[in-house]
Image (cartoon, rainbow, N blue to C red):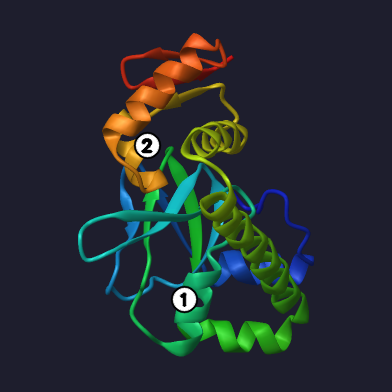
């Protein structure tokens, strides 16, 4: 694959990215980046879906955002520039293909191709909007609304009405308990907004 979906880069930049970049395929549920590990480089999504999140000292997950084709992890980008260890964890939610620009090339590419910096600023802006939505969800919405919003948003990102996830995993991503999630999912099913089966949630 020599194209970056949903991104318009000049042909010289695109050619250079594929010349120096390292393409990696990751099976579903594979850890792509772990906390306190070195960052592979500046990642660009070619296909699939990747979840980016933090974990606190008690093992509680805090979902930050999902990466879709054409997108990149701005936190990895900043970590590369600062030459620090990763503070996030990234896992493939689907079979995914990424290309990593090695950190030693990033400064040169940014100077040579200002469009890459514009791309980064666009990605940064998009992530900031997602962070604002995340804060608003926690501050102003009840858990039932947050669960339904999460299901709808993830359905859009995965391009599927069916989400393959357990109640426990959903509880981790939403920062609540499995008992609360199970009760509210049952309520949403009774309202015919979703359908439930083993480790699956189907958006009606």
CB under 8 Å between discs 1 and 2:
no
Q: Residue at x 66, y 52 (%)?
A: 3
Label 1: which secondary element: loop
Q: Residue at x 55, y 35 (%)?
A: 145
Q: Is residue 88 above or below residue 117?
A: above
Q: Which mark, by number, is residue 131?
A: none
Label 2: which secondary element: helix
Would residue 12 be found to the left or right of residue 21 on screen? right
Q: Nearer the viewer, residue 185 or 124?
A: 185
Q: Is residue 28 visible?
A: no
Q: Residue at x 75, y 74 (%)?
A: 118
Would residue 128 be found to the left or right of residue 186 on screen? right
Q: Which residue is mark 1?
A: 102
Circle 2 crowding by C-alpha within 10 Å: few under 14, some 14–19, many from 20: some
Q: Is residue 155 above or below residue 195?
A: below
Q: Is residue 134 visible?
A: yes
């Amino acid at each position: 694959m020599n194209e970056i979906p949903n991104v318009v880069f000049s042909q010289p930049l695109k050619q250079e990215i594929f010349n120096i970049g390292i393409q990696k395929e990751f099976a579903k549920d594979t850890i792509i980046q772990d906390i306190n590990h070195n960052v592979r480089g500046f990642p660009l999504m070619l296909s699939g879906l990747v979840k980016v999140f933090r974990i606190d000292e008690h093992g509680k997950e805090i979902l930050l955002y999902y990466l879709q084709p054409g997108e990149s992890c701005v936190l990895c980008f900043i970590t590369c520039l600062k030459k620090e260890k990763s503070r996030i964890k990234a896992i493939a939610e689907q079979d995914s293909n990424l290309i990593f620009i090695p950190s030693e090339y990033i400064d040169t590419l940014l100077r040579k191709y200002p469009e890459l910096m514009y791309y980064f600023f666009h990605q940064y802006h998009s992530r900031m909007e997602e962070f604002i939505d995340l804060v608003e969800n926690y501050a102003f919405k009840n858990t039932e609304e947050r669960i339904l919003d999460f299901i709808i948003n993830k359905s859009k990102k995965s391009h599927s009405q069916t989400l393959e996830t357990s109640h426990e995993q959903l509880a981790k991503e939403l920062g609540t308990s499995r008992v609360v999630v199970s009760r509210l999912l049952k309520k949403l099913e009774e309202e015919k907004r979703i359908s439930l089966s083993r480790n699956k949630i189907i958006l009606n």
